Image: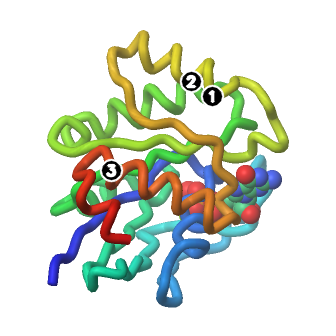
Amino acid sequence: MSHYKIIFTGPVGAGKTTAISSISDVPPVKTDASASDMTKSKKQATTVAMDYGVINLASGEKIHLYGTPGQERFDFMWDILVNGGIGLVLLLDNTRADPFQDLRFFLKAFDKFINGSSVAIGVTQMDLSATPTIDDYHLQLKALGIKPPVFAVDARVRDDVSILVQSLLYSLDPGLEEAQ
Ligand SMILES: Nc1nc2c(ncn2[C@@H]2O[C@H](COP(=O)(O)OP(=O)(O)OP(=O)(O)O)[C@@H](O)[C@H]2O)c(=O)[nH]1
Ligand SMILES: [Mg+2]
């Protein structure tokens, strides 16, 4: 039986922990701690080590899901978590001050891993901030010279997260996606 690993990353509040909770077929493991020092944050908890969940494919294969902390002070975990991974889900929060800067920052931080694997991008909170649009993201990515799948996703909605994960798997191996 094959096991695969994908990694969710992105800035604080993008919805990594929420997305893994939405899609995991087992109760997710979280390492959220009180975010009382994050005075500007709209949420109470932040990931300090990792999130973990699993998708069980119909074929019997398993996709292990790991979420990184968003905060840079925990960035030592990023290299640890990508080890052995086959692809990256980058979640961006459209309400942040400069989502394109977040995009560039995370593509750069994970560039080695992405070069050897694949990336799919999910833009969350588009219900709260409609711009930049998905087309704007496509243009930005084109300027950066890459063409990953980009979707509007609500991390709380299982189907949204599922489509994003499927697009990542499809870009890696069309046969794997069909197995679901
Ligand atoms: N309105 C709205 N809320 C969303 C959407 N996606 C996620 N959320 C909310 O945004 C928050 C995201 O929080 P987390 O899942 O903890 O974010 P995270 O990326 O794990 O953050 P860190 O661990 O701190 O890096 C949660 O309160 C979600 O319910 C969306 O599309 N729209
Ligand atoms: Mg988190």
Please tell me how many numbered marks the rendered image carries: 3
The answer to whether residue 173 is seen in the rendering is yes
Residue 112 position, x and y percent, is 19, 38
Which of marks 3 and 2 precedes in the sequence?
A: 2
Crowd rating for badge 3 (residues with CA inside 10 Å; few <14, some 14–19, many 20+)? some
Q: Name the amino acid, label 3.
A: Tyr
Q: Which residue is mark 2?
A: 137
**Residue drawn at (16%, 77%) of the image:** 2
Of discs 3 and 1, which sits in the foreground? 3
Q: Which mark is residue 170?
A: 3
Identify whether 14 is placed above or below 137: below
Residue nearest the observer in this picture, 67 or 65:
65
**Residue drawn at (43%, 78%) of the image:** 53
The answer to whether residue 38 is seen in the rendering is no
Of discs 2 and 3, which sits in the foreground? 3
Crowd rating for badge 1 (residues with CA inside 10 Å; few <14, some 14–19, many 20+)? some
Identify whether 158 is placed above or below 86: below
Which residue in the rendered view is the most extreme toward the top?
A: 143
Q: Are marks 2 and 1 in contact (CB under 8 Å)?
A: yes
Q: Is mark 2 within 8 Å of ligand 1?
A: no
Residue 129 position, x and y percent, is 81, 35
Q: Is mark 3 within 8 Å of ligand 1?
A: no
Q: Name the amino acid, label 2.
A: Tyr
Which residue in the rendered view is the most extreme toward the bottom?
A: 27
Residue 161 position, x and y percent, is 56, 60
Report, in whole angstroms, how far the alpha carbon at label 2 lies from the one at label 3.
20 Å
Q: Which residue is mark 1?
A: 134
